Image (cartoon, rainbow, N blue to C red):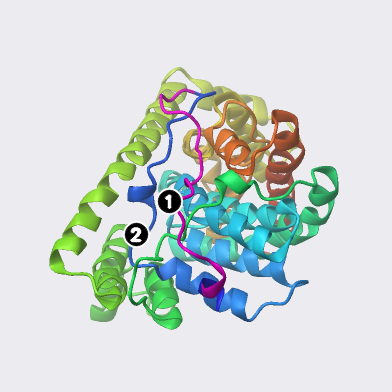
Amino acid sequence: DYKTHTKKSNTPGPRPPRAGGGVNNPPAPNHATLHPDPGGPDQIVDTILAKTGKRAMPWAMVLIASVIGLPLFFEVGIVLLIPVVLMVAKRGNYSLMRIGIPALAGLSVMHGLIPPHPGPLVAIDAVGANLGVTLALGLVVAIPTVIIAGPVFSRYAARWVDIPAPEKMIPSRPSEDLEKRPGFGVTVATILLPVVLMLVKALVDIVVDDPENGVQKVTDVIGSPMIALLAAVIVGMFTLGRAAGFTKERLNSTVEKSLAPIAGILLIVGAGGGFKQTLIDIGVGQMILDLSKNWSIPALLLAWLIAVAIRLATGSATVATISAAGLVAPLAEGMSTGEVSLLVLAIGAGSLFFSHVNDAGFWLVKEYFGMSVGQTVKTWSVMETIISVVGIVFVLLLSLVL
């Protein structure tokens, strides 16, 4: 049992970037609000690690990060998973990059390509894509992409930057004070609930294809992103909170504390939408269409390039996705359902290209892993670029089939 190897300690937790905000000095994450109190993710980690050998550990970290990162915003996922990465690296005497890169790759791929993350959801709405088809194709693209950028690339990253887990950054476990934790199966089921509901809606839409049908009306409601996510929150209060022995008061406190991080996400999405509309209103979208008429370049590759340019300029994957989706939306006219979904994935892949010093995620990774700027570029930035390039390659390959 992983827990028997870890004792409670008064050692300070991870020392995040200094508070204050800004590109080079992003706000410090609040562990009290970002760590899920009931310990569900810890149960997933413990179960997988108890059954994983040394060679398979990078693959286990990819699986853990992908499952836990599916419903979480990227920065939240980093704050949740990196303490676990540090403890696993120290306990198993692994190179930090061999364990950390697969976890970061799993989080990043989920964030850029898979709904219900904010960027992909907004892009789906902007170009009129089918949510279920995009989710299914996103998984097809995500699996090989995360394998190449995670376990495969981590072999080289560990040679370039061979550092141990920094002692002062290793925290006590988030759920050590709990007398009991929810089970592995129920935790995974709760995390995957919104995705399953959205996939059920997509399947019913394809099989039934009758807006007046009662079953389709029900699935259209429960499979919409907002309702699916709300259902997961309500179910989680019982399957996770009550299973951990939470009282009504603690459940209420946990829900209240979880609202604070959402404010930042809403601001990012709102700012990205405003930036997108500004670009459209000044004619950038039409200019791109006019220029692209004379280019012998696929629409998917053009969408990727636009997202790459915005990502490099703004540093935000969400802003890049939202802005690029608004600019290339006219390209979706006349495309098939599958092609429109691939357009969303091309934008998502481009939004992850080369994270550097204007990205808050860059500084979070640097500080948590105790790396220099150069080491962070060699590992984190290169990993993000691999995800972006491999992602668009698989999108283009799928476009030849669909």
Q: Residues within 10 Å of mark 1 (few under 14, many from 20)?
A: many
Q: Nearer the viewer, residue 126 or 22?
A: 22
Residue 25 shown left or right of residue 191 in the figure:
right
First to last magenta residue range? 4-22
Image position, residue 229 (x, y; %): 32, 62
Looking at the rendered structure, the secondary structure element under dot 1 is helix
Image position, residue 258 (x, y; %): 28, 51
Q: Residues within 10 Å of mark 2 (few under 14, many from 20)?
A: many
Taking the magenta stretch, the answer to whether it contains residue 215 is no
Residue 390 shown left or right of residue 204 in the figure:
right
Taking the magenta stretch, the answer to whether it contains residue 16 is yes
Circle count: 2
Residue 399 seen = no
Q: Nearer the viewer, residue 351 or 152?
A: 152
Residue 208 shown left or right of residue 321 in the figure:
left
Q: Which residue is mark 2?
A: 225
Give amino acid for label 1.
Leu
Tell me whether the residue at label 2 lies in contact with that at label 1, contact meaning CB atoms closer than 8 angstroms: yes
Image position, residue 99 (x, y; %): 69, 58
Please report whichever mark, 2 or 1, sits nearer to the chain's N-terminal start: 1
The relative height of residue 163 versus residue 286 in the rendered view (above or below) is below
At x 45% / y 61%, what residue is drawn?
A: 8
Residue 302 seen = yes
At x 67% / y 77%, what residue is drawn?
A: 52
Image position, residue 91 (x, y; %): 66, 64
Q: Which residue of the protein is positioned furthest toward the top in this rendering?
A: 282
**Majority secondary structure of magenta residues:** loop
The relative height of residue 152 versus residue 368 in the rendered view (above or below) is below
Q: Which residue is mark 1?
A: 121
At x 74% / y 60%, what residue is drawn?
A: 94
Q: CA distance from mark 2 to mark 1?
A: 8 Å
